[in-house]
Image (tube, grey):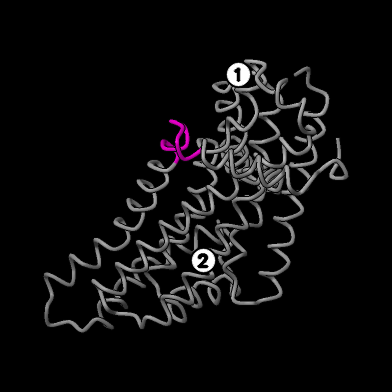
């Protein structure tokens, strides 16, 4: 099974059909609710302290309130992007996120970068595993190739994940613009688009991992458990290894955990290289999944 077997028309039909099923199925709705809940909780955790201080200290200007927030958020963001190595470059990077860009949105994006991959298994675990288990694909194979089925469902899952991220970022951006009114609308729009690009690109490899694991089993529940264990386990394992051994954090490079935060760097060439790395991860895991799906007894 290879990309040469893909028919664009049949790929589009399968993708559209999978999108409809994703929006109607219980798993799709669960992922939508979980992603919205997490995104809004993260935004509330960042915005609420600002609103509380603003309500108690009405004599302070919005700029002074934001400066207090920057001071409070700096250690957290330095840890999130620099781990235990806070050097001059990390300080400059944090200054870019907190001073040159809307600080509240930057803090929200830092949380979403860590949390979004952990939620993706709930949206991508049943790309093919359910139909492999109930033998439902054998009737579809009379009309199309395996490659169209695999890549069509993978593409549909990616569209769903990105669509949910658009919804979350739009809600947060509108709230900051209409309710708080401390940033210019143009600044919010520009940073929202860059944040959406970063979250979308970093999500693709994790969707491909879920597609690979889904093609490896005939049980949707086992696929969910394995996807969650692999994605979360790499992050947890890298954190434990880094705490015990020098270089242990390199374990995070098994997945984009080791590079994805660089999508918010101020240097455009680093952002481009990081996006390219995420696309290479996506291609690798998608190929592994297609290779496995091509050998399954359907």
Q: Nearer the viewer, residue 144 or 223?
A: 144
Res 270 → quadrant: bottom right
Label 1 crowd bin: few (<14), some (14–19), many (20+), radius 10 Å: some
Question: Where are the magenta residues, as a range?
Answer: 22-31
Quadrant for the C terminus in the image: top right
Q: What residue is rendered at 31% in x and 74% in y?
A: 177
Q: CA distance from mark 2 to mark 1?
A: 35 Å
Of label 2 and label 1, which has the lower sequence position? 2
In the image, is residue 3 above or below residue 293? below
Magenta portion: prevailing SS class: helix
Q: What residue is rendered at 17% in x and 72% in y?
A: 54
The residue where tag 2 is placed is 195
Q: Is residue 291 left or right of residue 232?
A: right
Residue 221, given in percent of the width and then of the height, sits at 54, 21
Residue 187, given in percent of the width and then of the height, sits at 43, 80
Q: What residue is rendered at 50% in x and 57% in y?
A: 80
Quadrant for the N terminus in the image: top right
Residue 258, given in percent of the width and then of the height, sits at 65, 52
Is residue 73 highlighted in magenta?
Answer: no
Q: Is residue 227 left or right of residue 254?
A: left
In the image, is residue 258 above or below residue 86? above
Please tell me whether mark 2 sits on a helix, a strand or a loop: helix
The residue where tag 1 is placed is 219
């Amino acid at each position: 099974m290879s990309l040469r077997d893909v028919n664009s028309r049949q790929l589009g039909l399968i993708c559209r059909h999978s999108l409809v099923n994703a929006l109607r199925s219980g798993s799709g709705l669960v992922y939508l609710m979980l992603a919205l809940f997490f995104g809004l909780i993260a935004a509330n955790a960042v915005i609420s302290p600002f609103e509380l201080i603003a309500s108690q200290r009405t004599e302070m200007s919005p700029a002074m309130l934001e400066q207090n927030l920057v001071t409070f958020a700096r250690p957290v963001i330095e840890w999130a992007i620099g781990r235990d190595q806070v050097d001059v470059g990390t300080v400059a990077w944090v200054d870019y996120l907190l001073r040159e860009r809307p600080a509240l949105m930057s803090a929200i994006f830092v949380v979403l970068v860590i949390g979004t991959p952990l939620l993706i298994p709930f949206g991508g675990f049943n790309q093919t595993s359910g139909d492999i288990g109930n033998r439902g694909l054998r009737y579809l194979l009379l009309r199309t190739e395996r490659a169209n089925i695999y890549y069509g469902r993978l593409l549909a899952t990616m569209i769903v994940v990105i669509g949910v991220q658009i919804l979350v970022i739009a809600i947060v951006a509108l709230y900051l613009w209409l309710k708080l009114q401390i940033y210019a609308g143009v600044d919010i729009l520009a940073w929202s688009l860059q944040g959406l690009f970063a979250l979308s690109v970093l999500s693709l490899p994790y969707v491909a991992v879920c597609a690979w694991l889904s093609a490896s089993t005939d049980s949707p529940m086992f696929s969910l458990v394995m996807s969650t264990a692999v994605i979360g386990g790499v992050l947890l394992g890298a954190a434990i290894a880094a705490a015990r051994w020098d270089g242990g954090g390199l374990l995070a490079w098994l997945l984009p955990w080791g590079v994805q935060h660089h999508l918010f760097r101020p240097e455009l060439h680093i952002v481009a290289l990081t996006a390219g790395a995420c696309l290479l991860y996506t291609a690798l895991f998608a190929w592994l999944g297609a290779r496995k799906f091509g050998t399954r007894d359907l």
